[in-house]
Amino acid sequence: MKLKFSKMIFTFLAVTILSMCMLSGCGAKKEKVLIYTSIEDYPIEIMNKLLKEKFPNYNITIEYFSTGNHAAKLLAEGTKTECDITVDLEYSYLERLTKEGILADLSSYDFSVYEPDTILNKNVIPLHRSSGTIILNTKVLEEKGLPEPKSYEDLLKSEYKGLISMPNPKASSTGYMFLKSLVNAWGEEKAFAYFDKLTPNVLQYTSSGSGPINAIVQGEVAIGLGMTNQAVIELSKGQPIKTVFFEEGSPYAVYGQAIIKGKEERKAVREVFDVLINNYISELSKSYYPEKIFVDKYFEIENYPQNIKYSDMSNNSTEEKERLLEKWKY
């Protein structure tokens, strides 16, 4: 009798556990979605939080790579890559990936909501626009009794020798952004001649885009050619920083996101990508990158410059970038 009763209890428990597992998905394999990104730490935190809230039953992994490594990895792996979605590659890299047939067709999405100059092709959705600015440490300038520069030509003055920092265009997309903007504004010959004259005043051509702002904050230089958003962050912390834009306008780059070809057929990948487009872009714009990419949406961040006049950044192809960088010798 005891044996029969024990069997009944065992059967009851087994059925109960099985039912609970069926309801809760116990033992079920979670859908995996792998994202490659080159965006900075804080925006990664926003992305991670947003996707975890939206998809608790998906196994979403975000892997960070430097821009060059990110693009090189996808070019090497092609459509056989484990990556499902690429986030925050600059458009010259995304154009190359498109030409190699690695990115999915996204023409089913509505591109009319984006500013025309942020649309690369129907394989890439804009993520954010990032501008460059001339960053001044007003305290260092004041201590050295130096005036604020008003033009690129002013930066050639001997009193600024060793007080300027700029990213190396060969190592940093920020540095290339400044080079390309002046090539477009003045012509190739004049632009390269300018950097020949500027180089004696440059303390260091840094290996990363954040190099100039770091040198500015530490008081190592008085002038940096860097990113507007990085300058605003430090200004908001109380650093003696000022952003100025010269007559040629602010150089800028647009960064985008895309699905790897063939991965768009997976429901989980499409759902995650939809959230990146419908939610993540706005979250980034509100807290980090307010510069205009939408036709009918505007975002403001305290201390962020408004109505920025942008440089001509046309003909920014991978081939053009490689050609110009071959000529860079510093």
Image (tube, grey):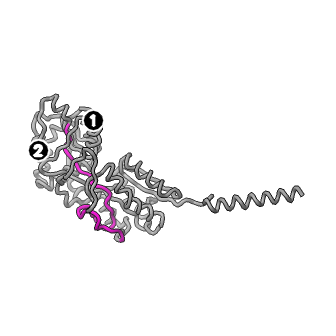
Q: Residue furthest right?
A: 1
| Mark 2 Cα shell of 10 Å, populated few (<14), some (14-19), many (≥20) | some
Q: Looking at the picture, how far across and down is residue 156, in whole percent?
A: 11, 40
Is 89 placed above or below 212 here? below
- Label 2 sits on a secondary structure element that is loop
The reply, left or right, for residue 207 in relation to residue 58 is left
Gap between marks 1 and 2 measured at Cα? 26 Å
Residue 76 in view here: no
Q: Quadrant of the N terminus?
A: bottom right
Q: Looking at the picture, how far across and down is residue 211, in whole percent?
A: 28, 40
- Label 1 sits on a secondary structure element that is loop
Residue 200 in view here: yes
The reply, left or right, for residue 245 in relation to residue 317 is left
Q: Residue furthest top?
A: 143
Check if residue 114 falls in the magenta segment: yes
Which mark is drawn over residue 238?
A: 1
Q: Looking at the picture, how far across and down is residue 54, in whole percent?
A: 47, 57
Name the image quarter holding residue 324: bottom left
Q: Amino acid at mark 1?
A: Gly
Residue drawn at point x = 28 percent, y = 48 percent: 301
Q: Which residue is mark 2?
A: 151
Name the image quarter holding residue 187: bottom left
Q: Amino acid at mark 2?
A: Ser
* Mark nearer the N terminus (1 vs 2): 2
Check if residue 134 falls in the magenta segment: yes
The number of numbered discs placed on residues in the rendered structure image is 2
Q: Looking at the picture, how far across and down is residue 225, in whole percent?
A: 21, 43
Camera-side mark, 1 or 2: 1
What range is drawn magenta here? Answer: 108-136
Contact flag, marks 1 and 2 (Cβ < 8 Å): no
Is 237 placed above or below 109 here? above
